[in-house]
Image (tube, grey):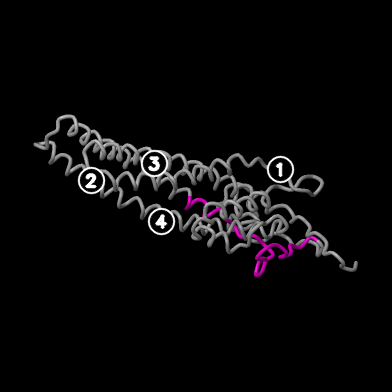
Amino acid sequence: MLCTRCRIRTAVTDDGLCTFCSGTRPPLPEDMMPRATGPGGWGVGDWPRSPVGLSWAVTALLGTVIATDLVAIVSGLHLRSLWQGLADAEEWGSQGSRIQSADRLHDALTDYQPAVFMVTGILFILWFHRTRRNAEVFDPSVQKMGPGWAVGGWFVPVANLWFPYRVADGIWTGSAPVGPEGGRTAVPRALLNFWWALWIATLLSDQITAHAQDMAVEPEQKAHALALVAAADALEIAAAVLAILFVRALTRMQVERAAQPPVPAPPVPGAHR
């Protein structure tokens, strides 16, 4: 029977959990115990904590982000067509009331989007931090930045364009399965790289669309700005899809990796045997 929580490994406990999700993995020999020797290794426990529950929550919320973006695109394109029609006709008339109604609906939707995105971001960072702590247990030697940067790196201006990627790269490397000879197995980084590239693209597109909306005065300018907003929402949908794939892939790697022993810590120079 599969584990009732992760649905990946075999259940071994009475309540239907695997060794990873239940924390009942048998002890390792002393020379194989994980050591907190990497950056920010203070307080790192000997056992990983399951990221499965958080990953499902993040996946569901990313799906909500996609749904809200799709609705916003439809609403925005409808409003754009109304502004475009006004620009062609050059008269307000009955078109004005339709534009006002569509504009109120679109504003309500765009006001809802940040709230969904914020909740999703909070859950994603919690999941991200847990996977970083797990990676410290799996292999601290490949972690480029401490666990604290899995949270703080997202909030430092300019640095947030690069620091979270460095953290993610260390997690990805440290979570790779162990090969037959005890070394890490190389896992392609294409998914990680594409997800991060699209995330940066969404940040830039948000800046462009915000500027276009602020500068829009004439009907044709408003129509152009709404087209840019729809394109930015479409880009965010693509980034959210890749984020879901990234979350699922990394979670699956850590579940599989938890069944294997940690990579032995490198010997300390000058230590006596």
Q: Which residue is mark 2?
A: 105
* Mark in the foreground, 3 or 2: 3
Q: Amino acid at mark 2?
A: Leu
Is 241 located above or below residue 108 in the figure?
Answer: above
- Nearer to me, 42 or 130: 42
Q: Earlier in the sequence, mark 3 or mark 4?
A: 4
Q: Point out which mark residue 186 bears.
A: 1
x and y percent of residue 156 in the render? 51, 60
* Mark in the foreground, 3 or 4: 3
Label 3 residue SS: helix
Mark 4 neighbour class, 10 Å CA radius: few under 14, some 14 to 19, many 20 or more = few
Q: Point out which mark residue 197 bears.
A: none
Q: Amino acid at mark 4?
A: Met
Mark 1 neighbour class, 10 Å CA radius: few under 14, some 14 to 19, many 20 or more = few
Residue 70 is at least partly visible in this image: yes
| Marks 3 & 2, CB-CB < 8 Å contact | no
Label 1 and label 4: CA atoms lie apart by: 34 Å
Label 1 residue SS: loop
| Marks 3 & 1, CB-CB < 8 Å contact | no
Is 71 located above or below residue 26 in the figure?
Answer: above
Q: Is residue 246 magenta?
A: no
Label 4 residue SS: helix
| Marks 2 & 4, CB-CB < 8 Å contact | no
User: For this view, does 270 lie left or right of residue 39?
Assistant: right
x and y percent of residue 209 in the render? 35, 44
Q: Quadrant of residue 232?
A: top left
Q: Earlier in the sequence, mark 3 or mark 2?
A: 2
Q: Amino acid at mark 3?
A: Ala
Q: Which residue is mark 4?
A: 118
User: For this view, does 97 lie left or right of residue 123?
Assistant: left
- Nearer to me, 177 or 11: 177
Q: Residue at x 55, y 56 (%)?
A: 128
